[in-house]
Amino acid sequence: MTGVLLGGGILALIALRQNLYLIFAVSVIWLYTQVGRGRVEDVIQDMVFSVDQELLLSVPLFILAGNIMARGSIARRMIRLAVAVTAPVPGGLGVAVVLSCAVFAAISGSSTVTLLAIGPVAYPALRENGYSNGFALGSLCAAATLGIIVPPSIPLILYGVATRSSITDLFLAGIGPALVLTALMAGYALIVNRDRPRGAWDMAEIGAALRGGIWSLAMPVVILGGIYSGHFTATESAAIAVAYALLVELLIHREIASRDLYAPFAQTVLLAGALLPILALALSLNMFLTLERVPQSLVTWMSTVVHDRFGFILLSMALLLVVGAVMEITPAVLVLAPLLLPMARSHGIDPVHFGIMMIVNLEIGYLTPPLGLNLFVAMTAFRQDFMTVTRAVLPFIAILLAGLAVVSLWPALSLFLLR
């Protein structure tokens, strides 16, 4: 009875989005002390042990790099170049917004940072050029979610930490799905804006935009090229991303001064301070569940419910869609990945492919009521009400669901670069 009441209270408070981290902490302590017969000290020890990993340093560093670039002019330069290149295409500005989000996501690794960097520049431009409010809101909210699948992706790093998977392999596996999702969104932008007037290529403008944005475009090449070539690790690449962002914004573009760096550093501290406790608690919980053999029990139970690979994919993807609508992606990845991965392995699904499936699925949660993070960010950034933003993202949710089906049923899309 106590467990039922506790579970009901947790679900109610999660639905109200109140004190989620505190509730999670109480739940973990309760499991340790009441179910596992452990002590509070055991929780603290496991938390300290679980976060004592060099790889986790990459998370706040990538966030910091993204915040520095959001403060500077990199986003604006990317949009200028994308607009110049897509000018002859009907709905070219809409396509340019999608491409800009994809490229910026490859630098920042974060959906929220991408939306906050590209949105304030792109949203007014879309509206001033006659694009509907719904398309402007929906395209920005949806394209920003590419930040969690385009490498270097913070959720992919967290999945790798939680499941002890290769971060490099996960980054490589994310490239194919990211290109497909980007193409689907760009294709939708072309279709719904096909009657808009076309422009013409202005080679002088393309040249000027390329010169202005070349340092920005070089960043993902340096970061990802260094990782894949083995010259530096994911953590070292995150530190290099910060150094590169500072170099470009302070010394090359010179559109921000050193005194302007307080805001991105403060934002990073706030985000990292919120992330670290939930990360430590989730990894501690994973250790507890492993000791209690919960994954093995779930695999046994799942085998009585689902008897083939396709059935498992359908059931697990449906579960993740529901979870993504009511839970933030960090705890969802850290808690569910170690539980679902043994079942995926039992059905012959590659751990890296399952990680990509899981992240693409939870990507949809950024757009799904009631707790879709990008919905709330868009409400604040663009001064729109919740229902307006929700209606705007509905076509893009359908696009992401189609992309999820392709990624789930076509493993080679994720794994071709690993073979």
Image: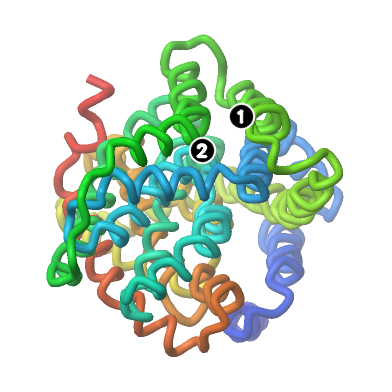
Residue 53 visible? The answer is no
Q: Residue at x 55, y 44 (%)?
A: 290
Spatial CA distance of label 1 from label 2 is 8 Å
Q: Check disc 1 and give the amino acid type.
A: Ala
Mark 1 in CB contact with mark 2 (< 8 angstroms): yes
Q: Earlier in the sequence, mark 1 or mark 2?
A: 2
Residue 82 at x, y percent in the picture: 35, 46
Q: Check disc 2 and give the amino acid type.
A: Ile
Which is more toward the observer, 343 or 57? 57
Q: Residue at x 50, y 56 (%)?
A: 118
What label sits on residue 241 in the rendered view?
1
Residue 321 visible? The answer is yes
Which quadrant of the figure contains the N terminus? bottom right
Q: Is 253 rendered above or below residue 260?
A: above
Q: Which element type, helix, strand or loop, lies under badge 1?
A: helix
Which quadrant of the figure contains the C terminus? top left
Residue 149 at x, y percent in the picture: 40, 46
Q: Which residue matches tag 2?
A: 107
Q: Residue at x 20, y 27 (%)?
A: 416
Quadrant of res 171: top left
Which is more toward the observer, 349 or 245? 245
Q: How many numbered marks appear? A: 2
Q: Is 200 rendered above or below residue 213?
A: below
Q: Residue at x 47, y 35 (%)?
A: 213
Residue 2 at x, y percent in the picture: 67, 82
Which is more toward the observer, 47 or 355? 355
Quadrant of res 398: bottom left
In the image, taking residue 275 as reference, residue 350 lies left or right, namely: left
